[in-house]
Amino acid sequence: MVDSATQIPGEESTFFLDSFQPSSCELGLIFVGHKDVGERSGLYLVADGEIFTLVNEDTLIQGVGGTLENINPATCDRGRVAFGAKSSLNGQGGVYEWEDGAVRVLADISTLLPGTSHPVAGLGSPSVSGATTSFRGLEAVVSVESLFVADGDSFQEIADTLLIPPGQASPFSTLTAADNALEVVFRGIFPGFTSGVYAWSDAGLRVVADYSTPILDRPGVYLRGFGVPRTSGEGIAFVAATTEEGQGIYVASSEGVRTLIPHLAPLPGGGALAEVSRLDIHDDTIAFTGYGLGEFRPRLLLWREGQLEQVLAQGDVLDGQAILNFNFSLEYSRLAVWVLFEDSSAAIYSVNVGNDGQAPAIPALGVMGYFLLAAALALISLAVLRSSGAWHGLSG
């Protein structure tokens, strides 16, 4: 665990950990930390029992000069780390890539939309996979919202709010953050707040699911109110409601759309799933924030091997402190969880969700928290790096 008492590498100060979600990849666990509220941001890597600085506000931007400012959360794949930040040269935002210790620009205010003289702006929310990174932005001159892909050598727009997708009479009004894997998948919202899930590849744009898409296991029932999609081993997963009930989790494959976790599915420890606020995926394991029927307490839940498991919930006691809020990401079989405690301190935990047969190494949770986690995490090991900056309890 990294927490508010952990010393920043090369600094005399300790981390201020805000609510930016951590991420994991083959390099290790990556998180955003600040010296204080809004001060001196950086991206840090936890690997092999140590904390390393990837980039901070002293890091030079290769080829253009200037240094990074206001560094945002990152995604990582195959040794490449993509993130949003501002440049000290102009204070404008851009999307950057770190690889082998160097930082280069993927897109910034000087980047022109292909075939035009229009610069792009409002860049952010990158998702990296293989050689390409997808991200949102605006065509600055005409204020058209767009989704782009870049690989450092090329830059391409794949969708914008002038585009009328297949099966629709109107163009997109809003485009959400994309998930970049074999295809770039994203949610499009239309006037009147209808929505759909779409995928782009070199073959073009296709509909994954919209309001006309039937549910294979629910004849006569159709989807409504889509959430942001994520790619999984089973296909493309997303949160949606239906014409008959509230939110559940669904998965689209070449065969069609089927229910993965239905509305009002039984929850570990009691209650029924009524609402899902966000999800993340690795292979066939899904992590998501869920709410029980009639509850206002968010729970962090896992779906794997056809079973729901509860990791933690607001109000649980972890390391002797009550949990006030949390955020998470699931990548490379590792669930990275940011936790805010009621005393305003914060910490980041790393949980291995692989089935390695190891018993869980769970810190003190209090009686109720222990039973919830012990039942849920029978095969999960919790890596704990404690406040002194030293790591202990590391397994998995």
Image (cartoon, rainbow, N blue to C red):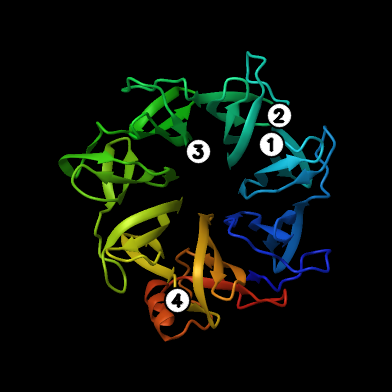
Q: Earlier in the sequence, mark 1 or mark 2?
A: 1
Q: CA distance from mark 3 to mark 1?
A: 16 Å
Residue 82 rendering spot, x and y as whole percentages: 65, 43
Q: Look at mark 1 in the image and give the residue it sits on.
A: 94
Residue 182 rendering spot, x and y as whole percentages: 49, 36
Q: Crowding at label 2, few (<14), some or many (≥20) Cα neighbours within 10 Å?
A: some
Amino acid type shown at disc 1: Gly
Q: Crowding at label 3, few (<14), some or many (≥20) Cα neighbours within 10 Å?
A: many
Of the two numbered discs 2 and 3 in the rendering, the one whose residue sits closer to the viewer:
2
Q: Crowding at label 4, few (<14), some or many (≥20) Cα neighbours within 10 Å?
A: many
Amino acid type shown at disc 4: Asp
Q: Is residue 109 above or below residue 57?
A: above
Q: Look at mark 4 in the image and give the residue it sits on.
A: 316
Q: Look at mark 2 in the image and give the residue it sits on.
A: 109
Q: CA distance from mark 3 to mark 4?
A: 32 Å
Q: Secondary structure at mark 1?
A: strand
